[in-house]
Image (cartoon, coloured by chain):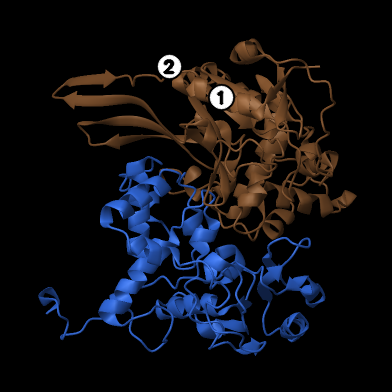
Chain colours: A brown, B blue
């Protein structure tokens, strides 16, 4: 059995981390909504909540807006200035397993071909203390993508709420062990309460079969009509990672920055000529489903989705990736409708 | 009401008066209603109605994929219908190309209903249900956030918006759900050259939200969809409501209320109190 730590001792420890200059982020309640935010004191952290925040922890390792370098042009002189990299240690406490699990998934992409330095730096300085889920809502579907409420993937340490004002603490990596060395308590004697796992929402094999043959299916137009083309799903998704690089400032002085982007926006694929290879929302939705459930799995051997359900929770049209997956699951593929995948 | 709604839609589709019904459906008990597009009479059973029908479906009238389905019957609440009035006034929809099914509304959701002045649609081709309680009555308990905010000094309001906008990730859900944000290409998507910072920095976020509010001044009907859609929980609709109050105070104009009234930005008068107009 792993040691236990009381909620009070955990909060004291969080305050010690903050006082020692570490950046700490946790679920915080803002206007009745749970969101991951940086905190100044342990009192802000919501560590007993059963449900997950409406955003994801990716913002702490892959920020929504990041300065890559500054530029200045004087006459024929061009000078570049590197931003001062953030070196402080960072701890995300109370991360949901579906958020922690997303980081190893993102690692593949940011180390693919060449190492993405800003991302690597962010990962290096960050430790993830995940909190196993004890409840789920209508949008949760981790069990349908091979994960679970107590999934330890991506976590440096895991907390299990024992329901009596204390947590079982399981260190997983060296980084996780270092965080808690001073505060190891006697081992837990009671068993962990079992998490409440969401019932399967779709058959992953059926999704794979559908994607393998139905690229040209009329489903894509019919099943995605409600999508309004915003980025609420992508920007709150722990695994969506597309970005845009733009120069901001004047011709003489400014900065090159990296900002989140989403395949659901028409501008994402707009060519300078004016041509857009994905000219309608159905094509953009189809791209997203293929990327998550066919293209990424083919390349890296895992699904680009942890079943957190934020896409469905945050979709103003009640769709999200989950809505599309459920609709695919309801489809019947007739043999004569099968078509080869067009690439 | 649901039975009558379904009967109406079955009749419209059966008689080919419309080719698609844009209404609300519900996947499971307790869930928010979601938009459905019914094209076959036998599917009208998917239609639902109730206090969970938050979305303003008029936003779909401008979407090309929906237009391609043919003439539409559209389910509207009182607030949604105000958007329809503005869209028609701005020559974005032909009222004759639409069949409007008005639903007498008892309120759907406190934040959405805080600016409600029209419970019962007034110009529908068919009205379903009885006009219910007075507007706003569904959410009497909490003080209105706009009133609370406007009572504060400017420095505190500035601090409030700085804190709120710090959470904005620029997903543009507020824009996409808005029936009146229908520009073919939004100014923030004009990138040759970039006009508004695309960054979700505090500067970029202020630039976006202020631009958005200005472009909707005296046009926003207060349906509250922007606030509902925001995944960061930012009450963006307050900015629009504040400008709506300004339009009302200065020009006696409320968007989407009187189809005969000339829009503030679409009309001028030689008796305008400003000199530059003459």
The residue tagged 2 is A87
Q: Which residue is mark 1?
A: A12
In which chain is the residue bearing label 1?
Answer: A
* Chain identifier of the residue bearing label 2 in the image: A
**Residue at 42% over, 77% down:** B91
Residue positioned 54% across, 46% down in the render: A277
Residue A140 position in % (x across, y down):
73, 44
Apparent side of residue A281 relative to residue A339 in the rendered image (left or right): left
Residue density around tag 2, few if under 14, some if 14–19, many if 20 or more, within 10 Å: few
Name the image quarter holding the N terminus of chain A: top right
The correct choice, above or below, for B159 with respect to B45 in the image is above
User: Residue B6: which quarter of the image?
Assistant: bottom right
Horizontal and vertical percent position of residue A50: 70, 42
Residue B206 to residue A196: above or below: below
User: How many numbered marks are there?
Assistant: 2
On the same chain, marks 1 and 2? The answer is: yes
Label 1: few (<14), some (14–19) or many (≥20) C-alpha neighbours in 10 Å: some
In the depicted view, which residue is nearer to us: B265 or B154?
A: B154
Question: Disc 1 or 2, which lies upstream in sequence?
Answer: 1
- Would residue A33 appear left or right of A146 to someone viewing this image? left
| Residue B80 seen anywhere in this rendered image of the structure | yes
- Nearest the viewer among B24 and A167 is A167
Q: Secondary structure at mark 2?
A: loop
């Amino acid at each position: 059995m792993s040691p236990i730590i009381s909620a009070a001792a955990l909060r004291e420890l969080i305050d010690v981390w903050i006082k020692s200059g570490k950046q700490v982020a946790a679920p915080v309640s803002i206007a009745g909504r749970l969101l991951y935010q940086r905190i100044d004191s342990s009192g802000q952290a919501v560590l007993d909540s059963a449900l997950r925040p409406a955003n994801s922890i990716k913002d702490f390792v892959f920020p929504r807006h990041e300065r890559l370098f500054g530029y200045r042009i004087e006459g024929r002189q061009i000078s570049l200035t590197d931003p001062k990299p953030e070196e402080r240690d960072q701890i995300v406490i109370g991360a949901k397993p579906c958020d922690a699990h997303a980081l190893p998934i993102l690692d593949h992409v940011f180390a693919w071909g060449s190492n993405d330095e800003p991302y690597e730096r962010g990962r290096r300085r960050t430790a993830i203390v995940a909190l196993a889920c004890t409840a789920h809502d209508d949008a949760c579907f981790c069990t349908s993508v091979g994960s679970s409420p107590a999934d330890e993937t991506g976590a440096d340490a895991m907390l299990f709420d024992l329901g009596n004002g204390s947590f079982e603490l399981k260190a997983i990596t060296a980084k996780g062990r270092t965080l808690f060395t001073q505060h190891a308590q006697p081992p837990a004697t009671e068993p962990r309460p079992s998490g409440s796992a969401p019932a399967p929402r779709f058959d992953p094999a059926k999704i794979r079969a559908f994607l393998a043959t139905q690229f040209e299916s009329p489903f894509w137009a019919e099943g995605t009509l409600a999508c309004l083309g915003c980025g609420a799903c992508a920007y709150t998704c722990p695994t969506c990672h597309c970005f845009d690089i733009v120069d901001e400032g004047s011709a003489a002085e400014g900065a090159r920055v990296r900002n989140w982007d989403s395949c659901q926006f028409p501008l994402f694929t707009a060519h300078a000529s004016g041509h857009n290879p994905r000219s309608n929302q159905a094509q953009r939705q189809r791209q997203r489903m293929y990327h998550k459930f066919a293209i990424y799995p083919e390349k890296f051997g895992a699904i680009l989705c942890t079943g957190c359900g934020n896409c469905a929770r945050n979709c103003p049209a009640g769709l999200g990736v989950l809505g599309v997956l459920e609709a695919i699951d309801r489809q019947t593929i007739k043999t004569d409708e099968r078509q080869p995948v067009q690439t | 009401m649901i039975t009558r709604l379904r009967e109406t839609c079955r009749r419209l589709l059966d008689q080919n008066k419309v080719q698609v019904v844009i209404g609300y459906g519900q996947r499971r008990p307790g869930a928010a209603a979601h938009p459905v597009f019914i094209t076959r009479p036998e599917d009208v059973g998917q239609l639902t109605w109730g206090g969970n029908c938050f979305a303003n479906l008029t936003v779909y009238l401008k979407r090309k994929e929906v237009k391609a389905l043919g003439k539409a019957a559209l389910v509207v609440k009182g607030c949604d219908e105000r958007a329809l009035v503005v869209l028609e006034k701005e020559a974005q929809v032909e009222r004759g190309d639409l069949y409007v099914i008005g639903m007498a509304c008892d309120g759907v959701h406190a934040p959405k209903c805080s600016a409600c002045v029209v419970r019962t649609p007034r110009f529908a081709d068919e009205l379903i249900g009885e006009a219910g309680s007075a507007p706003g009555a569904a959410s009497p308990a909490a003080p209105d956030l706009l009133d609370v905010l406007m009572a504060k000094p400017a420095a505190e309001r500035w601090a409030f918006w700085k804190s709120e906008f710090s959470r904005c990730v620029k997903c543009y859900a507020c824009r996409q759900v808005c029936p009146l944000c229908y520009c073919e290409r939004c100014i923030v998507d004009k990138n040759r050259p970039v006009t508004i910072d695309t960054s979700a920095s505090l500067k970029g976020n202020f630039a976006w939200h202020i631009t958005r509010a200005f472009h909707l001044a005296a046009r926003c009907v207060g349906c509250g969809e922007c606030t509902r859609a925001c995944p960061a929980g930012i009450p963006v609709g307050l900015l629009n409501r504040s400008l709506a109050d300004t339009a009302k105070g200065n020009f006696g104009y409320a968007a989407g209320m009187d189809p005969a009234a000339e829009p503030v930005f679409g009309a001028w008068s030689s008796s305008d109190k400003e000199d530059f107009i003459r």
